[in-house]
Image (cartoon, rainbow, N blue to C red):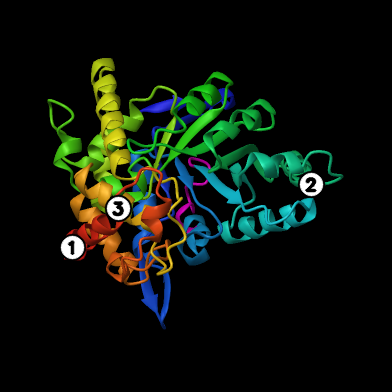
Amino acid sequence: MVYKTFGKTGIKVSALGFGAMRLPMKETDGKKIVDEDLAVPLMQKAFEMGVNYVDTAPLYCETLSETAVGKALKGWRDKVYLSTKNPIEDADGDHWMERLEKSLKKLDTDYIDFYHFWGISLKGFESWQGLKFGPLEAAYKAKEQGLIKHISFSYHDAAENYKPIVDSGHFETTLVQYNMLDRSNEENIAYAKSKGLGVVVMGPVGGGRLGAPSEKIQGLLKNKPSSTAEMALRFVLANENIDIALSGMGNLDMLKENFEIASRTGHLTEEELRHVKSMMEENKNLAKLYCTGCNYCKPCPQGIDIPYLFEIMNRYRVYDLKEHAKSAYREMMDGLSWVKSADASKCVSCGTCEEKCPQKLPIIKQLRETHAVLAN
């Protein structure tokens, strides 16, 4: 396993982190719960192999991830760095402390190594300034008490709002989204690294999107990777500004594959990295020919989320992620997707969307094509 110095903390962390968002689940009495008989040994196997960073959160896995992680850490607590998050439901520091104490209890531990302000925005962050006892003051108090070791933040806000949070000087590590399909935080990652923050990346395989086979993506290198997931992970690990790539590994095969990839050095040459970025940029521009995602077509009277359906279709025809695109569409049709949308067959050709589209796209025709391709 490759280890990197985690920003100014000086801690050596494994290049591969265990993301506990997608632990094995099972159904009991009509409820989904973590299958601890599979999840706990899987995490402990990762620790045995050299993975020394595990990331969880209060709401992961039907709110049961922290409990499972706590059980997996038995016998490993002094060897593995633990990361979890505070959802910051309000700006009250006492409530912030209550949420921390709840996580400590579920994790069955006395302290958390890297405690994240979960998914903060610049607007929210600025609103905490000057409070008598807000989230930031609570974090410093928790650190003084030894309940947390390092103050961190995860981020989903607009890329342009990121740097002021780093510049505040409050945070020691950061967690952001980054992968071949979404490089919007590339500059922010480099900036955080230059300021001495440890950098962790979530979604290196695009939240599973890049786990599906794609001849087009695998073919970006002369020495073709064995899978699209390998290509995606190598791309992230090749970025010298990234310390840890989090992967939500649900079985031993995934763990072994990711471990083998993360244990290499020299993931991509500079020339290969430039080529991959150039080709992915071309693909991104091609996708925009079909839909830029401006959302002017919304709302659809029939409840169709047109930009989302076209995004799925772009995964199919632009990125060659055919299996994933069909699966995502079927999940949406079955009401299992986080995006709630009617399927494309519900279009009644009213033309409202086409009137509002600044690109004058033949949306009605493309919706028919989308359903014909993805519903089969």
Question: Which secondary structure is most common in the magenta stretch?
Answer: loop
- Kind of residue sitting beneath label 2: Gly
Q: Quadrant of residue 145?
A: top right
Q: Is residue 344 magenta?
A: no
Crowdedness of circle 1 by 10 Å Cα count: few (<14), some, many (20+)? few
At 33% from the left and 38% from the top, the residue drawn is: 181
Q: Which residues are magenta?
A: 71-80
Please provide percent x and percent y for residue 349: 31, 65
| Type of the residue with mark 3 | Ile
Q: Going from the N terminus, do you reach mark 2 or mark 3 first?
A: 2
Residue 45 vertical placement versus 79 (above, below): below
Q: Quadrant of residue 9?
A: top right
Q: Residues within 10 Å of mark 2 (few under 14, many from 20)?
A: some
Quadrant of image for the N terminus? top left
Q: Disc 3 designates what residue?
A: 312
Amino acid identity at mark 1: Ala
Residue 77, horizontal then vertical, whole percent: 52, 46
| Residue holding disc 2 | 134
